Image: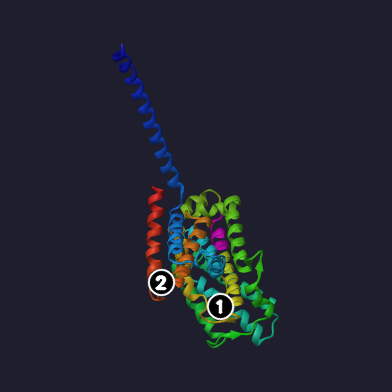
Amino acid sequence: MSHANSNTDEPVKAGRNSEAQTSSERLVALGGSVLRQVPGPLIGLIAVCIAFSWMSPYFLTERNLVNIFSQISEIGIMAVGAALVILIGGIDLSVGAVVALSLMVNAWLYRDFGVPFVFSSLVGLGVGALVGLVNGVLSTYGRVQPFVATLATMSACSGLALYVTNGGPVTGFPDWFTGLASLRIFGLPFESLLMVTIFLTVAWWLTFRPTGRSLYAIGGSEEVARLSGINTRQVKILVYVIAGFLAAVASLVLGARLDSAHPTAGISDLLSVIAVVVIGGASLAGGSGGMLGTFIGLLIIGVLRNGMALLNVSPNLQPVVIGIAIIIAVMLDRKTAN
């Protein structure tokens, strides 16, 4: 009798084991699905933060985290414009030179001509938008490749930034302006709040406005976007104008922090700006990317620079480490996308 009962129990146990195995397989599949939804750059950012937290006791302090956001503000503002240009399948090599030219024109008008600083700043912002307009017109109506067009304007802006003051720096900005660099709102730097506001505004525009969403269509296929009724030339010019204007905004952030204008300021940030966008998952072919990914890429660059400075890593080796991080982040992003 007991033997019969054991025989009847075996199918029951087998069924329970099968159900348990099926449940575990579902959990594994669910975990894999969730992991694929996590952006690769975010995984890289978390890994870098954990590593620096372990290697330096000063990394996770409130003061250091605030410093990171403050140090990346102007690069982040430039990266927003660069991301928009890359989103439509273009490239803007002039953003760093626009920072230099806009800041120098602003300081030149203020010092040498006595123009009130508010008005000279508006002129500097206008210079940035004008350079963006030239880039947009050259790459649309002029049918010049964006790489060539923005390379030409980069060279012209760099030369003009040196010419307006004969290569010399300009110092002595108003106290209220330089005070913005140390201004805190709810304990956070004003320049960081400005950067985050720009990110959120552009993210809203890309998500909820037809003009913003059209950038993805143009980057995916410009011809299809044109046949769909999108004025591709107008949108592309608008994007380049925004990129130039934001570079000029970044020049104000940099000028307030340094309390001076240098004719080469911002030019060396070009590669960092492009790296931020690429690390954030944007495709250089256009049509993919966004503000969230760009912001994560910005944090990766900022954390790497800050962490290596805390560990006293040689400045000559820091670009090597950042280059390796770029490759790893991009590979992680491609892996999680598959």
Prevalent SS, magenta region: helix
Q: Does residue 188 appear left or right of residue 7 in this picture?
A: right
> Label 1 amino acid?
Leu
Residue type for callout 2: Gln
Q: Which mark is residue 318?
A: 2
Q: Nearer the viewer, residue 128 or 16?
A: 16
Q: Quadrant of the N terminus?
A: top left
For residue 77, which numbered disc appears in the image? Answer: none
Mark in front: 1 vs 2: 2
Whole-percent x and y of residue 140? 51, 63
Residue 208 lies left or right of residue 289; in this view the side is right
Image quarter of residue 248:
bottom right
- Please say if 13 is above or below 38: above
Measuring from the top left, give residue 316's x and y in whole percent.
Answer: 39, 76
- Secondary element type, mark 2: helix
What secondary structure is found at the residue carrying circle 1?
A: helix
Q: Of label 1 and label 2, which has the lower sequence position? A: 1
Most foreground residue, 213 or 75: 75
- Residue 223 image offset from top left, x and y in percent: 47, 52
Q: Residue at x 44, y 67 (%)?
A: 147
The residue wearing badge 1 is: 101
Separation (CA) of disc 1 from disc 2: 28 Å
Q: Is residue 91 visible?
A: no
Which stretch is magenta? Answer: 230-240
